[in-house]
Image (cartoon, rainbow, N blue to C red):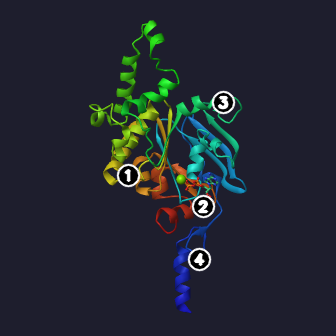
Amino acid sequence: MSETDTTTDASTSDQTTAGTVTTSGESVEETRDAWTDYDVGGEPIMSVENLDVYYGDDHALKDISMDIPEKSVTALIGPSGCGKSTFLRCLNRMNDRIDAARIEGTVAFDGQDIYQPGTNLVELRKRVGMVFQEPNPFPKSIRDNIAYGPRKHGEINRGLVARLLGRDEKEKEDDLVETSLRKAAIWDEVNDRLGDNALGLSGGQQQRLCIARALATDPEVLLMDEPASALDPIATSKIEDLIEELAEEYTVVVVTHNMQQAARISDQTAVFLTGGELVEYDDTEKIFENPESQRVEDYITGKFG
Ligand SMILES: Nc1ncnc2c1ncn2[C@@H]1O[C@H](COP(=O)(O)OP(=O)(O)O)[C@@H](O)[C@H]1O
Ligand SMILES: [Mg+2]
């Protein structure tokens, strides 16, 4: 009997008043709005309000409201299946491509709801670019990976018309390629072989090339979904350094399941937990050192998830 009592005492003393414990060790608690009411200080560049996402009958994200401050790194963390990728895709309407997905709520970018009818999706995705988990360069030259999009959308005109107009488009393109590759910290590694096929690069180089490709359309926000999880530790650390550098000029929103990575590179962290809830959102230091939610603390200390 005394043994049972001791166990009970030890586990309850661990809990805040809001929590009780399930058999798996995960606490059950009422979430509080105050935990996600993060003050970004000034106008957010993106503002999500009352966002719900359904895949058929599956309610994947529940009533998410969250402001994203500009020129900083916002990390999205949480166990697999909690809706991080779904949330990220909502920020540039990538979920539109999934037939089963239904979205309610608003996502304001630069003061405009991106879900209002008439939104130009090509323009939106240029301004809010995306980088995926698996590097996905085009099977083209390094140069063409950067120049293809802008050329296709008419920012770089080549051929007779351009020549008749007397503009040196070749030079403009060279500039764009170099600037984008430099910003993605890969210029030094590839400048002597811009004509080579991008698929010949290492995984880490391919991912930095994909970041350069996203930068070439002059975005304001970069969405990254576990951008380093397919890479080795050295390539990962290069991507982490790059993300921190990019945040001086761009707004970066990055999904990661690597908590040390979130702690290292982000300014604020949003914790999503099973069931598609945003449970806590605050300065990264606060989330990792002294979270309000017991479930967040359990998750961060590795008690579940
Ligand atoms: N294309 C899809 N079709 C149907 N259900 C999906 C789709 N993508 C994600 N889901 C479901 O939505 C939930 C959240 O998934 P996801 O956003 O991928 O989570 P995470 O990125 O946190 O692992 C999961 O239950 C997943 O099965
Ligand atoms: Mg995901």
Amino acid type at mark 3: Thr
Residue 176 at what x, y percent from top left?
Answer: 39, 24
- Image position of 155 (left or right of 140): right
Residue 166 at what x, y percent from top left?
Answer: 42, 7
Q: Residue 274 carries which label?
A: 2
Furthest-bottom residue in this view: 1
Alpha-carbon distance for marks 1 and 3? 35 Å
Alpha-carbon distance for marks 2 and 1? 26 Å
Residue beneath the point at 63% across and 35% down: 108
Position of 180 relative to 223 (above/below): above
Please give the residue where the numbered disc 4 appears in the rendered image.
Answer: 23
Q: Residues within 10 Å of mark 2 (few under 14, many from 20)?
A: some
Q: What element carries label 1?
A: loop
Q: Is mark 2 on a helix, strand or loop?
A: loop
Please give the residue where the numbered disc 3 appears in the rendered image.
Answer: 119
Alpha-carbon distance for marks 4 and 2? 16 Å
